[in-house]
Amino acid sequence: MKVQRLAFLLTVCLISVGLLVGAAIGAPPPLEAWKPAFDPSGAKYKCVVSNVSHPDIKGVYTGFAIRDELWKRTNGQIFLDFKPFSMLGGEVEVLNQLQMGAIQGMGCSSVAATNLGPRFGIVNLPFLVDSFEKLDKFVASGQIFDHFLMAMDHQGIMGLDITGYGNYGWATTIPVRSLKDAKAIKFRTAEAAVNQLLYQAWGFSPVAMPWPDVPIALKQGVITGLDHTPIVCNISKKFEDAKHFTYINYAQGLFIWIFNKAWFNSLPADLQKTFKEVVHEVCAKIRKETVQQEADQIAAAKQNGIEFISLSKEEMDTLKKLGDSVHKKFAPEINKLYPGDTYRPANFLEEVDGLLGYKP
């Protein structure tokens, strides 16, 4: 009887711990709401595509929109099996899966993309592509944007287009009204070189961390701030713990839609053409919708009591001045050319600076 009672108590304890851990981690919601309205079992070609975030974010939902349009336009020949919510892991490990061909595609954040394509880091440089208007100008730049998308070509990965998730700022557990306040914050940043360089230049101590680890770290105080956007913080419920947001608007949050070249080249020529057309059309539509989504999510967060704060012009000027050192330090990586590059500018960063009117 004692053994049975002990076993029973142990089982109850394990179940309780499991429930607590599950609640703390927050298991990703089921994909029922986004399941396809068709039976994909007959597809001739399958493309598994990963993303770390929530498909309520327009820039993430792109994966499902591409899936449905591809199915229609290829008459059911290609099924894009989209896996959001970090279902396949954090971005660094998923990038390795993509390079090896274990998966075929990824909506990769621009911050993490620098791990295999340093040139992608140009969009993370502070106060360069720092508005929706400048992003549109960058995308419409022809060979400049095409050269940007070639950043991972030497790794066997092709970039096709981008979608966004808004303007970067600081979501914090205590209000940040000055740079002095910011120095007391333990900021989580992506596992990315540009972000680390930037926060060091600003005199902060960043904590590089995979996105799936953030919820627990925020709740436990391992981090007290996020380098992120209002769209992401509101939809992914980070504002439940970080109830203050300081506008910085130093860069646009972007997802770069990248695919394994060997897999893509295995498709017939007509399907390759359709694949590219669908990605471009869907991404262009989503980029427009993201502008309104940011305004809507900020309004919703304010209604729920989230405080939005602006720094003084003097302190913003300080951030810009300090951040310029990152442009100089990372320029060699951005300007590096690879054998597959058809456009070979003498100074790519300088060209983008001129296009977007960047001045230190």
Image (cartoon, grey):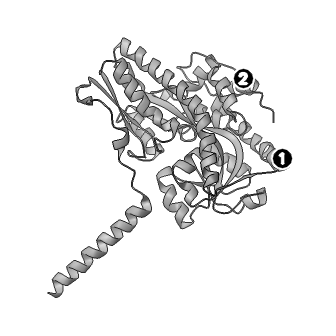
Q: Is residue 344 above or below residue 53?
A: above
Label 1: state its secondary structure: helix
The reply to whether discs 2 and 1 touch (Cβ–Cβ < 8 Å) is: no
Identify which residue, 214 or 112, lies in the foreground: 214
- Can I make out residue 118 in this image? no
Q: Which residue is mark 1?
A: 313
- If the image is split into quadrants, where does the N terminus sit? bottom left
Residue 66: where, in percent of width, then height?
A: 42, 27
Q: Which residue is mark 2?
A: 351
Outermost residue, left side: 1
Label 2: state its secondary structure: helix
Q: Quadrant of residue 95?
A: top left
Residue 223: where, in percent of width, then height?
A: 59, 61
Residue 112 shown left or right of residue 18 in the figure: right
Q: CA distance from mark 2 to mark 1?
A: 27 Å
Q: Amino acid at mark 2?
A: Glu
Q: Is residue 187 above or below residue 59?
A: below
